[in-house]
Image (spheres, rainbow, N blue to C red):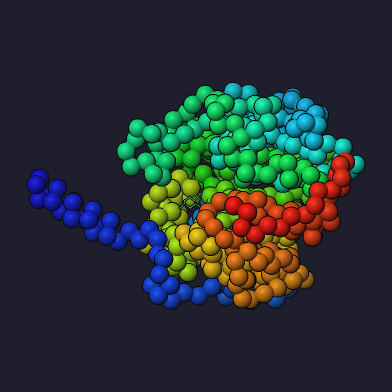
Amino acid sequence: MARFLCSLALTCLVCSAQINRYNYDERKIPPYTVVDPLVLANGEKVIDAKAWTERRRPELLAIFADQVYGKTPAAPAALRTSEAITDRKALNGKAIRKQVTIYFTADDAGPQMHLLVYLPAGAKSPSPVFVGLNFNGNHTVNADPGILPGEVWIKDPSAVNNTDNKKMLHLPPDDRTRGINAANWQVEKLLARGYGLATAYYSDIEPDFVGGVQYGVRPALTSDVEDWSALGAWAWGLSRALDYLVADKAIDPRHIALIGHSRLGKAALWAAAQDRRFSLVISNESGKGGASLLKRGFGETTDHLNGAFPHWFCRNYKQYTGHPENLPVDGNELLSLIAPRPLYVASAADDLGSDPKGEFLSAVSASRVYHLLGKKGLGVSQMPPVDQPVMHDVGFHVRTGKHDVTEFDWDQYLNFADLHWGPATTGVAPAPQQNKPGAH
Ligand code: GCU
């Protein structure tokens, strides 16, 4: 027995020595190649838009579903929601606020998501809208006292080594957190520029911890929860939010921008890859497992993704722990699936875990698909200096500062949406456009 325990301890030591969570040294990047998104799995080259749309795009979607994010269940036959609670004079008359519950199954007490929608008051035509999941509850995105606070999941403070939120507590609504993430959402700025915002709490879809799956939508929709994933479920939930938005006459269904930060950026990219109704897509520091190149071994590794967040990816993804080189797809192919729609990839200089250079190179590679589809793509091949955005059909910036969504980021996203859709019309006088590098 003692010998067995001893060899177990030794094996564990060896395992932990092999776990390579992050690499921050360019010199230690193993040789890698950025796989060309325009080559089919059988080696054939994709030479025209037809081959991309009919062969390579479906092939990539199937590989991502099989190996990375899991298989997405079908959308419900019909969208089922509560009656919307509407206030036409929210935010001192600047906004129409709607709050609606989206039921994921036929059961009103089953999994469900609470969607908060702000639209600019007095808009003369259907409004363009940004939609994204939030991390801490709808009531945290603005101090607006009218936002209905919901139940939240928080990290269990009494659990030891709980850095990756392994243990979480389900708590009743807490008014003390109202508006704490307002800087990340910039609601008033969006409204002043003629855009609406729709958001839901990601834990409504699935709470973000290893045991969270049992409280989310996955068990209701599949018998094999590990053949799907938490990221896949969040992506699916985004499409359900979109079902609601495209049915709202006050919203322009051709102008719905999807934004996601970090893990929710990974989910947003996967949602937009599958659901072409998202008309513009923003990856805010989605990093590895999102926009960035995993095979460029800098920043976060598959070892860390699978070790710290085993629920994020599907069962098949586990085989890439220690072996990102075997992945059949990478971030550049995920970005390619957004083409030809406008796509913005944003990084932050201090967010080394996401590997800003890997995010940039990924956007450069995906631009090949934009070119094939008659678009310009990113338009540059050299990484721009910090705080100097590049905007064509693909946009990119690396902002000064840390992993976050800041006012500077939002200024670029609003400019990018204006660039592609024309400035949105508002019922009020347009606010001066701001572009404040370093506003964070
Ligand atoms: C962790 C994780 C990243 C993720 C980030 C986030 O840092 O390692 O992959 O993007 O959390 O979601 O904030």
Front-lying residue, 432 or 395: 432
Q: Residue furthest right?
A: 124
Residue at position x 54%, y 47% in the image: 231
Q: Where in the figure is residue 64, as x and y percent of width and height?
A: 55, 57
Camera sees residue 151: no
Q: Where in the figure is residue 354, as x and y percent of width and height?
A: 50, 59
Q: What is the total number of numbered labels drawn onto the structure image? A: 0
Q: Where in the figure is residue 301, as x and y percent of width and height?
A: 42, 60
- Looking at the image, is 278 positioned above or below residue 149? below
- Looking at the image, is 151 positioned above or below residue 301? above
Residue at position x 68%, y 31% in the image: 144
* Relative side of 134 to 311, left or right: right
Residue at position x 46%, y 74% in the image: 32
The image quadrant where one finds the N terminus is: top left
Residue at position x 69%, y 34% in the image: 116
Camera sees residue 343: yes
Q: Residue furthest left?
A: 2
- Looking at the image, is 433 positioned above or below residue 363? above
Q: Where in the figure is residue 96, as x and y percent of width and height?
A: 79, 33
